């Protein structure tokens, strides 16, 4: 496959960004999208278009910076906007799971970073997703003293339906597609998945009220928008987490505020 790539380049958060066009040839349809990006960067390096040369006046911006880690659809690091869709044209996959057979020979592919106020660009296609970490630190956990005589969590009976629904929310990998896709830049699906997965379990109910209030407050503080139920987040979530978790978050939050 021969492809034309329009890639977003941006030196840092304060610099003005722009699209740069590249051509890559002989790409295997069985290659993953990130492998194709590796081939592009290898091509740029072999052509001598390295960052040092850029500083000395080279017209090209050098190899493209993009984020990745596990390349197995688990870590959520490989977050890209591809041809106007979060994670590309396939459904329920992350960018690293996307294969080039989803594109046509000779196609032009536009590659951008997440576009959200909560995810400022660090460089090129890499964004700062630490806002999600801060939301989790506000309450996305269960406080348990260790070392004592505590019953094993598996000894607490939980209805199968509740356990499966909790695990549906726990599948969230924190990639940020929900906030990047939402017209309001809302992180509600991310927060809801975390709150809901714990609220459905006995271990999570004790701190449920504090958790819901703290995580929503931190989300608002970090500049994420409000939810207006367009369900774009649900459509683009690679783990297909549904907005039913947002409904549960709203109930948890309202009950917590009423009990104040």
Image (spheres, grey):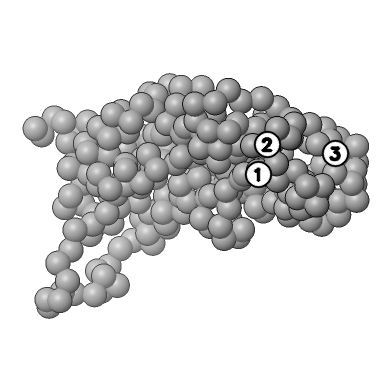
Query: Does 218 sit left or right of 82 as displayed?
Result: left
- Asked whether residue 55 appears in the rendered view, the answer is yes
Q: Secondary structure at mark 3?
A: strand
Do residues under tags 1 and 2 come within 8 Å of each other at their CB atoms? yes
Q: Which residue is mark 2?
A: 56
Cα separation, mark 3 vs mark 2, equals 24 Å
- Asked whether residue 36 appears in the rendered view, the answer is no
Q: Position of residue 37 (x, y in %)?
A: 73, 48
- The quarter of the rendered structure image containing the C terminus is top left
- Looking at this view, name the residue that lies furthest to the front: 56
Do residues under tags 1 and 3 come within 8 Å of each other at their CB atoms? no
Residue 239 versus residue 80 in the image, above or below: below
- Looking at this view, name the residue that lies furthest to the left: 260
Q: Position of residue 104 (x, y in %)?
A: 87, 40
Q: Which residue is mark 3?
A: 23
Q: Residue at x 12, y 76 (%)?
A: 148
Looking at the image, tell me whether mark 1 or mark 3 is earlier in sequence order. Answer: 3
In this rendered view, identify the residue nearer to me: 62 or 166.
62
Residue 17 versus residue 196 in the image, above or below: above
User: Where on the picture, by quarter, is residue 222?
Assistant: top left
Query: Does 156 sit left or right of 46 as displayed?
Result: left
Q: Nearer the viewer, mark 3 or mark 2?
A: 2
Q: Secondary structure at mark 1?
A: helix
Please tell me how crowded label 2 is: few (under 14), some (14-19), or many (20+) other residues with Cα within 10 Å.
few
Q: Which residue is mark 1?
A: 52
Query: Does 237 sit left or right of 81 as displayed?
Result: left
Q: Position of residue 16 (x, y in %)?
A: 58, 23
Please tell me how crowded label 1 is: few (under 14), some (14-19), or many (20+) other residues with Cα within 10 Å.
few
Q: Position of residue 241 (x, y in %)?
A: 49, 44
Q: Secondary structure at mark 2?
A: loop
Cα separation, mark 1 vs mark 3, equals 22 Å
Q: Residue at x 17, y 42 (%)?
A: 210
């Amino acid at each position: 496959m021969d492809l034309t790539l329009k890639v977003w380049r941006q030196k840092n958060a304060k610099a003005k960004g722009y699209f740069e066009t590249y051509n890559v040839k002989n790409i295997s349809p069985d290659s993953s999208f990130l492998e194709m990006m590796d081939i592009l960067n290898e091509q740029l390096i072999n052509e001598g278009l390295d960052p040092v040369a850029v500083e000395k006046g080279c017209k090209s911006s050098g190899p493209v910076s993009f984020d990745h880690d596990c390349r197995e659809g688990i870590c959520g690091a490989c977050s890209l906007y591809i041809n106007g869709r979060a994670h590309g044209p396939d459904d329920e996959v992350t960018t690293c799971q996307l294969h080039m057979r989803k594109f046509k020979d000779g196609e032009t592919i536009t590659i951008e970073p997440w576009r959200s106020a909560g995810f400022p660009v660090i460089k090129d296609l890499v964004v700062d997703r630490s806002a999600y970490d801060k939301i989790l630190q506000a309450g996305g956990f269960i406080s348990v003293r260790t070392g004592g005589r505590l019953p094993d969590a598996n000894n607490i009976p939980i209805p199968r339906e509740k356990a499966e629904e909790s695990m549906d929310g726990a599948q969230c990998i924190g990639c940020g597609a929900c906030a990047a896709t939402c017209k309001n830049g809302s992180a509600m699906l991310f927060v809801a998945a975390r709150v809901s997965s714990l609220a459905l379990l006995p271990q999570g109910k004790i701190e449920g009220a504090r958790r819901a209030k703290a995580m929503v407050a931190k989300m608002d503080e970090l500049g994420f928008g409000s939810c207006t139920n367009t369900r774009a987040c649900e459509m683009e979530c690679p783990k297909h987490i549904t907005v039913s978790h947002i409904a549960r978050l709203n109930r948890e939050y309202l009950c917590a505020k009423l009990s104040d």
